[in-house]
Image (cartoon, grey):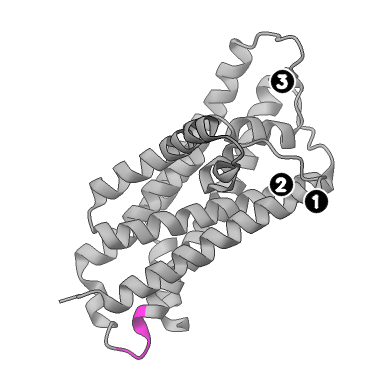
Amino acid sequence: MINLFKMDLHRFLTNKMMYILLMIYSAFQIFGIFMGKKYEQPVEGETLMSAMNESQFIQTILSQTPSWVMMYITVFSVYFYMSEYNSGFYKNYISMNNARIHSVLSKILTLGLFTLFMLIVMIISDLIGRAIFFHNTTIGDLGFFVKLIIGQFLLHWAFSIVILCLTMMIKSMIASIVIGIVLVLNVFGMVAGALESLIGNSNFSSYLLVNTIIRIKDFNDMNETIHVASVAIIFMVLFSLLAIRYKLKEDLR
């Protein structure tokens, strides 16, 4: 397990695609703040974007569909897995004891690192953009901010595991990215929400992963915090087990 993780970590840290994605995201995030300032219009009953603290700003940005954070996570998750699969490098270690299980767990940990990097870059880019264009770098309540970042990290890490699992099953870079984009656009969440409105007395769609990510939450409310944690953990465990189960039965010849 440790050796496989070291190999994946080396591929991760020397992966030019990872750094390119982070730089592009940062540039567009700062540009988006500039455009937000340029076309900002006061709306009755709503806080101006330039007056928001970082916690409010992050929730507002992540609630917009499509979520660019999830889009970049999709691209990297697919690319990272398919680059190894297409090269056939897995054949060098797949005969080792429990190599299939350890390979999946190693990639899950690596995707967790990329998710963490994405959120760090997002916060840094926000602070730079807000300092330059909004002249406002307030964070807000520190406890709320920490819970927000932890919650979003777990949710986005769970999303990366979903993409990894689907990519392993599909084995096509283009098809996996297309399906990932469909998930990012929250097509399933909108369909589920529409069905719920017809049926009534159902709250199933609120437990869907993408719906939970894009919904603005009050982390000072224990029920909201438990909701986020439970959704993240359920999806992480479920799709990790599905990925491991599939890898164990996969014909790698």
Residue 21 x/y as whole percent: 42, 44
The three-letter code of the residue at mark 3 reads Ser
Q: Nearer the viewer, mark 2 or mark 1?
A: 1
Q: Secondary structure at mark 1?
A: helix
Residue 63 x/y as whole percent: 59, 33
Q: Secondary structure at mark 2?
A: helix
Residue span colored magenta: 96-100
| Residue at position x 45%, y 73% in the image | 105
Residue at the limit of the structure toward the bottom, as seen here:
97
Residue of label 3: 50
Residue 9 on the magenta segment: no
Question: In what quadrant of the picture does the N terminus appear?
Answer: bottom left
Q: Is residue 55 above or below residue 97?
A: above
Residue of label 2: 148
Chain-order first, disc 2 or disc 3: 3
- The image quadrant that residue 13 belongs to is bottom left
Q: Secondary structure at mark 3?
A: helix
Q: Nearer the viewer, residue 92 or 67?
A: 67
Q: Is residue 246 left or right of residue 130?
A: left
Give the CA separation, mark 1 to mark 3: 29 Å
* Tag 1 and tag 3, C-beta contact below 8 Å: no
Residue 82 x/y as whole percent: 28, 59
Name the dominant secondary structure of the magenta segment: loop
Q: Is residue 241 above or below residue 123?
A: below
Q: Nearer the viewer, mark 1 or mark 3?
A: 1
Q: Is residue 89 above or below residue 51?
A: below
Q: Is residue 226 left or right of residue 244?
A: right
| Residue at position x 45%, y 48% in the image | 73
Chain-order first, disc 1 or disc 3: 3
Query: What mark, if any, has residue 222 been given in the picture?
Result: 1
